[in-house]
Image (spheres, rainbow, N blue to C red):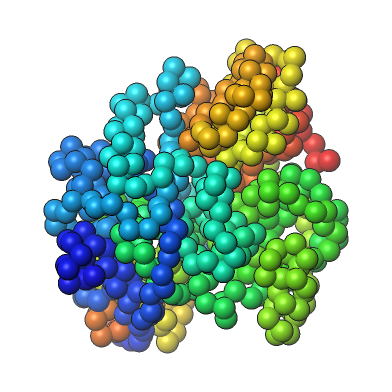
Amino acid sequence: MRDGAEGAATAAAMDLLIRYGDALACDRLCDVRNVAGTMTQPSPVKERLVREGGWDKAFAVINLDCDTDIEVPAMRVPTCQLQHGFGPDARGVVPYPDQRIALQQDAESFYGRRGVNILATCTPYQVGNIPVRGEHIAWMESSAVIYANSVLGARTNCEGTASAGAASLTGKIPCWGNHRDENRYGTHLIDVRTPVDSFLDWGMLGYFAGGVAGEEQPVITGALGRPDLADLKHFGAAAATSGGVELYHIPGITPEAPALEAAFGGARIPEPIPYGPAERRAVYETLNSAGDRADVDFVLLGCPHASVDQVRRAAAALDGRRLHPGTELWLMLPRALRDVADRSGYTEVIERAGGRLLGDSCPAMSRVAPEGTRVFATDSAKQAHYLPAILGIEAWFGTLEDCVDAAVTGLWRGRLP
Amino acid sequence: MITLHGRTVVPGYAEGEALVSPEPISGWGGIDPAAGRIIEPRHALHGMSFTGKVLVFPSAKGSSGWSGFFQSTRLLGTAPAAMVITRISTKSALGAVVTRVPALTDLDQDPCLIIRTGDWVRVDATHGLIEVKPGTLEA
């Protein structure tokens, strides 16, 4: 492919993959049929490139690291777009330039014609892109990578914009790291000694696990309830935020660890690191360390993008109530699930209370919160970690109910349950 | 003069003043590509410029946007002159490739301990060689 026999774009893609493989000291590529990357999300650099040479130029530079002019061909393998800053439902709601939304829509039509599935979510696995166990894939988005590796048993490293772009045109990615059996075993054992059986607690445990394991593979045992999709979505996003965890095992729950011994591949099981009430409280205090003022201007739910069940719970908590006049509530979700929320009547309940559902979206990517926000509250450990740095605002972290209470009263009254 | 040997990540030669991070670096949410600075609050290098410097750091952390943010430093003219990375990962490997700066990893000594901020460093990434002149800044 590098010789140009399959076109200049494919040759550039293969050239990037070879440079990337060399950088990893990896001389083998593996075949992938599932790529999750980012092409349509506007950025200042991308806007300039589009002005200079259209989407072909932007793809060449940003998605292939290529200086020559190419035409973007059809994707060789199934490829999807991850989350955006905001979609068209943000018009008139969010202080986000209309021209960015228009540019994004133009990008969607360009890339859609070339076979990019515009899922526009950080959770492709919630809207039909569910790789099977053992499948080699090339995904970006740290929270999606950890979910695909750990919960689904698929195999991916944390790819970047250019490697995902190159994979989409070649169906190849370096066979390094998480693609290989020997790198998929546990490295740290965390023994949970305080009950973890709620969305809040799974997120806090994930934040702790990332701090312990860094970029390696924690194995979690102990006083665990049975997690659902949203719990593990929150756990993984948090572990990928406080550390760089891309793969974990929960014996008896995640597919590559039917038992504790299997999680470590038969190797010696390390000394357990305890997660008890003191560690739990320390995580809660860390995630709440960026907040002093109790008056909350903004409540953010749905990071990673909410499941339908999370939307239903938010609607139930908001039913018959009304947001405080100075406080906004945004709930992020895949646009495809917004349709389900609309049909199920959840959107109407949330909007009647004064809240908003925003499809495709991520305030951390777009760097946009409601005008004048000084203090926000969230049920997401990931957003409580990132948004104070990105937007220079204070953060409160708590349960969905704490967040809804803050949205209705304008005051944070959350406590560690 | 101190010499370190390592493995080529991106070939090439560059020299410059060292900026040494004692902790991992975030790309997305950790640097401002337009300014060429570390912006992560509570980071040891918060507010420091890496433009034109030999950036020495233990590893990349955080979002998969790492490589894209460092690629932007090249496109905006704020890139470091070279990268010396203690422990490689997909984020930093791809990041060095798309930033197109000489880069090394797998050094025979811990570069974050041996090299100090302000040292003058010659990075011959093609031959896997780093020469460090302690504290002798060339104007």
**Number of numbered labels in the structure image:** 0
Residue plotted at (46% across, 24% down): A90
Residue plotted at (85% across, 59% down): A223
- Examine the rendered structure and indicate whether residue A109 appears above or below residue A272: above
Residue A327 quadrant = top right
Residue B54 visible in image: no
Q: Is residue A416 left or right of residue B5?
A: right
Residue A198 quadrant = top right
Residue plotted at (33% across, 58% down): A76
Residue A185 visible in image: yes
State the image coordinates of residue B78 (x, y, percent, origin top left). 26, 53
State the image coordinates of residue A410 (x, y, percent, origin top left). 68, 20
In the foreground, A279 or A106? A106
State the image coordinates of residue B6 (x, y, percent, origin top left). 36, 84
In the foreground, A284 or B132? A284
Where does the N terminus of chain A fall, quadrant-wise?
bottom left
State the image coordinates of residue A263 (x, y, percent, origin top left). 70, 74
In the foreground, A216 or A88? A88
In the foreground, A74 or A43? A74
Where does the C terminus of chain A fall, quadrant-wise?
top right
Residue A44 quadrant = top left
Q: Is residue A158 left or right of residue A351?
A: left
Residue plotted at (30% across, 47% down): A114
- Examine the rendered structure and indicate whether residue A197 appears above or below residue B109: above
